[in-house]
Image (cartoon, helix red, strand yellow):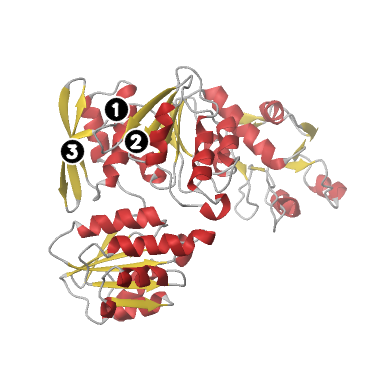
Amino acid sequence: MNLTIKEMIKATKGNLVRGDQSRLIKNLSIDSRTISQKDFYLPLTGENFNGHEFITQAIEKKASGIFKEKSWEISNIDEILKKNPEINILEVEDSLQALQNLGHYKLTRTNPKVIGITGSVGKTTTKDMISQILGESFSILKTKGNFNNEVGLPLTLLNLEENHEMAVLEMGMSDLGEIQRLVEIAPPNIAVITNIGSAHIQNLKTKENILQAKMEIARNLEEGDILLLNGDDPLLWELRKQDTVYQKVYYGIHKHNDFHPAEIIEEEDGCIFYVDLDGKSTAFQLGIPGKHQIANALAAIWIGYYYGMKERALQKGLGKVVISDMRFETHKISGAKIINDAYNASPESMEASIAVIENMKGYRRTLVLGDVLELGDYSEEGHRKVGAFLAKGDFYRLITKGKDSKWIGLEAITEGFPAEQVYHVVSNEEAAKLLNEDLSPRDLVLIKGSRGMQMEQIIEYIKRGRKLDV
């Protein structure tokens, strides 16, 4: 973090109950279990926890100081202070607000360009691509893992250093108002929306409401700022009719977009595509399968080019892109190709992954699909939509796992998929047993479902069943 307590007081509008304002604090921790000596502890509260209950534990671990909310009284405070006379105590109205204020303060002090990314599908991959390309020419900070919410975003910003020129920040949401708060903490210079899908439709009810929530990322954009939109998405494409003080730029596969590929050559493990850069056709190679990934890459290339990067640096950066864990991660078991795409799922992302598998020729292809969670009243319709989509393809077998995923199989059968090739199971172990019955080098298997379904376990069960450690 590298902030003095004086700066922390300024950022949080807090009150120093005791301590030394000149003390430099290098690290902030919100977890008393992992706190290290000299860390400053900030207790957060939630529905089922209150970090204030662990203040004593943090002090015992030799924390350099603690935040506390004014409403919280520390028991045995006199005894604690006798044992730890150098402890710094900073009092604030609200701990979460204090964390967010600290993140915003660090951003304004270091002042990098901010690229904010949101969308129902593909925001993490797009963030990784943007970061990899910009990293060829700039010093960047990017969101790690799923640190894309009201806690994770300010924690990410606290890692900013004076040399950072760019901050590439993923911004997630599950309801209205959440992205608005994130852009107040970190106002983007360029905001990216990858698409509008059905993720979080349980809370927001309609895609139009999801669009409204995602568009909060543009709420603070000013003249000279840019909203970069995937014009392949019908709802985002409609926004072109609106007048704004900021500039709207459309990217995507289709020719109507401002930035699109002139030619695409799909391969099993990636693709080559050509885009126009100042009148010159420029080739890019992407080592990730799937046409939909080209759209994500286009957003990253456009941003790099906008910030003055040369063709060679753009190509080199994209060539280094490695997809995050459990996103089309390939395993070989007994010669069979197993695709672990189990990080998360929505009906739209399932269809995109199924389309990729459909284009991988020469295999006997099996789909193993789990429940898509958090769809609420849209669940049956969303799952049936996937079933109707896959029924158009040429697949050897469909295995669904969970509860609502049964609708995928039922709709697929209705649309002509052979009923004898559809199986529904309730556990990952059952799915693995089915696959193990005749798994061979001619097989290609896609495994995908929502994070809560833990579909990646199927791969481990397959390995155990074959007594292999691959």
Q: Quadrant of residue 239?
A: top left
Q: Is residue 214 left or right of residue 253?
A: right
In front of the other: 354 or 441: 354
Q: Quadrant of the C terminus?
A: bottom left
Q: Mark on residue 258? A: 1
How many other residues sit within 10 Å of disc 1, few (<14), some (14-19) or many (≥20)?
few
> Which amino acid type is marked by label 2?
Gly
Distance from disc 2 to disc 1, alpha carbons, whole Å, reads 9 Å
Q: Quadrant of the N terminus?
A: top right
Q: Picture coordinates of residue 221 (x, y %)? A: 51, 24
Q: Which residue is mark 3?
A: 273
Measured along the vertical axis of the image, is residue 35 above or below residue 397?
above
> Which amino acid type is marked by label 3?
Phe
Q: Picture coordinates of residue 324 (x, y %)? A: 36, 50
In front of the other: 419 or 102: 419
How many other residues sit within 10 Å of disc 2, few (<14), some (14-19) or many (≥20)?
many
In front of the other: 14 or 33: 14
Distance from disc 2 to disc 3, alpha carbons, whole Å, reads 18 Å
Circle 3 SS class? strand
Residue found 38% across the figure and 35% down from its top: 237
Q: Which residue is mark 2?
A: 231
How many other residues sit within 10 Å of disc 3, few (<14), some (14-19) or many (≥20)?
many
Residue found 31% across the figure and 72% down from its top: 413
